[in-house]
Image (cartoon, grey):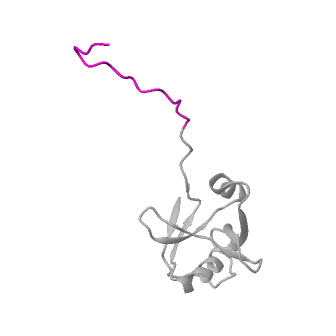
Amino acid sequence: MTRTTERDDEPEPGAPTRRGRLWVPVRTAAGGGAVVRLFRTPLGERTAVAFTGPERLVAALGAGHGWVTLGEPALRALVAPLGVEALCVDPALTASAPAPVAERAPRVRPLAGASR
């Protein structure tokens, strides 16, 4: 996972960057348009999230998740008015689901000296 917050020497929106194209998770807005999804870091900081390929987005969020492609400067320009400066690239957002645990009846031992 790469987390960047530096803004020095940032190119203009739409200019090529060292990361190239990013796949950005979106949700559908009430009017039918796409809205960039924001997430929170483990410490609670709001962050934009992007992936370096669609397969990485699907691995983290699932196959049914919407996305758009943007350059890093364009993504930063979209979330800056919301006060979001952090950008996490290729995060592992969730842990694997735990293996199912078989239900077992609790063991009950009779008290010492108790009669049945």
Count the marks: how many? 0
Considering the image in quadrants, where does the C terminus appear? top left
In this rendered view, identify the residue nearer to me: 89 or 26.
Answer: 26
The residue at the point 50 percent across, 70 percent down is: 4
Say whether residue 21 is visible. Answer: no
List x then y, in percent, for residue 69.
72, 70
Instruction: Please say whether residue 108 is one of the residues in the magenta stretch.
Output: yes
The boundaries of the magenta stretch are: 99-116
List x then y, in percent, for residue 1.
53, 58
Q: Is residue 1 above or below residue 18?
A: above
In this rendered view, identify the residue nearer to me: 35 or 4.
Answer: 35
Q: Is residue 98 above or below residue 36?
A: above
Say whether residue 35 is visible. Answer: yes
Please indicate whether residue 98 sits to the left or right of residue 15 in the image.
Answer: left
List x then y, in percent, for residue 109.
33, 19
The residue at the point 56 percent across, 44 percent down is: 97
Instruction: Please say whether residue 64 is one of the residues in the magenta stretch.
Output: no
Of helix, strand and loop, which mostly describes the magenta segment?
loop
In this rendered view, identify the residue nearer to me: 101 or 111.
Answer: 111
Res. 99 image quadrant = top right
Point out the residue furthest to the left here. Answer: 113
List x then y, in percent, for residue 43.
41, 65
The residue at the point 72 percent across, 67 percent down is: 67
